Amino acid sequence: NKHRMKKFLSIFFLFTLLIQSCFSVNTIMRTQSLRDGDVIFSEGKRFAFGFFSVGTSKLRYVGIWYAQVSEQTVVWVANRDLPINDTSGHIKFSSRGNLCVYASANGTEPIWSTDVVDTISEPALVAKLSDSGNLVLLDPLTGKSFWESFNHPTNTFLPFMKFGYTRQDGLDRFMTSWRSPDDPGFGNFTYRIDRRGFPQMMMYKGPTLWWRSGSWTGQRWSGVPEMTNKFIFNVSFVNNPDEVSITYGVLSPLVITRMVLNETGILQRFTWNGRDKKWIGFWSAPEEKCDNYNHCGLNGYCDPTSPDKFECTCLPGYEPKKPQDWSLRDASSGCKRRDVASICNGKEGFAKLKRVKVPNTSAVSVDMNITLKECEKRCLRNCSCVAYASAYHESEDGAKGCLTWHGDMLDTRTYLTSGQDFYLRVDKAELARWNGNGSSGKRRLVFILISLIVVAMLLMMILFCFIRRRRQSNRRKKPLSTFASSSFDLEDSSILDDLEDKSRNRELPLFEL
């Protein structure tokens, strides 16, 4: 009876789906196929799925694009490296339950497939396009998902898409650039989460590290200062043994936004301006020289705040390996420790660098259970420890965790705002030199303020004395002028001279008045 009931429910549900498919535009049933020219839309018609061409090319691709945006904007591509030469392509389910793209209606070998390993036997299987832009293979009877496009990004990161690694399914979700603006094939650049050491986002050009986001601070990536508390997204970062991932959620459903890794290696965030009918870019990286990975070499320090000076210096306690190259503004050779012998003799300390994107954290030691003060003590006891910092210095519960660096440090830079504190191990002489130079700027600022106050007070005293003497001088002249003008004809010079002579005599009653 149970078997019959289950069979009846399956047949009934299939019949219901068949009726709905006449009116629904967001699903492909197992028994259906899509030809070139057919399009399915998400329920709210935010996204579309079907065949398309890019630019002036006549090659045909299968993918997902914005349906409500006048400018063609593709967010996901299936057959990236295997386009179809004409419009004879078909999309349909295979006998094993995979959604496949065929070059023709009679094709037997797909040029692309969802590639689910296990056979999907569910007869109610459908492919459904959601309003988030996610194409999902699922069984609507149970809600079980077998495959989704969000787990296989191309060059675009959409809101609510999970980015990173999950141990449960073994998936590592990352972005790959297009080959060119008119070719969505796999390009030279990839963007992914590096799980080694303390996680961070990395962009690669082929095998070469191109840009680094910095580590997670508890609220944002340390190398993305634009991610402030007033950021327009809800950001969720997960870091545990089973998952290292990040998800962005928009605060308003009216916001249409996307992050794209373009073919030149620039990561860009866009929002759609519905009034002007165009995409507005409001963030990109890398953006300046100091953003380029390891621009100042090993143990170098990049500071873009002085445009008239070379942006590269060595970290405190270090000096250029090849001074002649540095004089030519080539810091690729990096820096070396100035005096190795004096760095672990019990007399050293830590120079505090502010507003820093801390060095590469791929090889750091991590302890999330100790305080920053305990972190300092641990680093001081270990002669191989060259620096330390707080792991989550902006977490909701306050700063916590400890990161320690051992060996050479790569890709360190400073910002005008944002960044975090970084504590670098230096010997006694370097620490005195660092503090004497006012590493934090406080001493110099106090000296300048005191000097300005003293100068201002002196100027005020001089001005006060000058005004007072002038007033006293005017008082001595005023009685003479008043008396003379009211009692005598000043054209009589002899009388005026006589009065002036008498005015010098302080005993005259006239001036006693």
Image (cartoon, grey):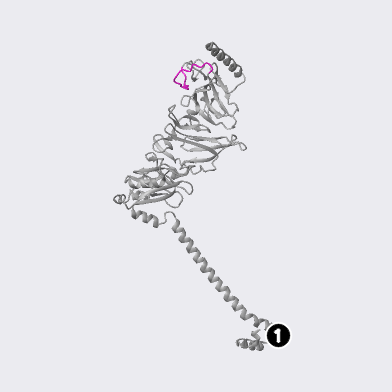
- Label 1 is placed on what type of residue? Ser
At x 51% / y 41%, what residue is drawn?
283
Residues rendered magenta in the picture = 109-124
Q: Residues within 10 Å of mark 1 (few under 14, many from 20)?
A: few
Can residue 167 be seen in the rendering of this structure?
A: yes
Give the image location of residue 97, x and y in percent: 49, 18
Q: Circle 1 sits in a helix, a strand or a loop, which is it?
A: helix
Residue farthest along the front direction in this orientation: 1
Can residue 176 be seen in the rendering of this structure?
A: no
| Residue labelled with disc 1 | 487
Q: Is 68 one of the magenta-colored residues? A: no
In front here: 5 or 281? Answer: 5
Give the image location of residue 177, x and y in percent: 47, 33
Give the image location of residue 358, x and y in percent: 42, 44
Q: Quadrant of the C terminus?
A: bottom right
In front here: 38 or 181? Answer: 38
The answer to whether residue 67 is above or below residue 338 is above
By secondary structure, the bulk of the magenta-drawn segment is best described as loop
Q: Quadrant of the N terminus?
A: top right
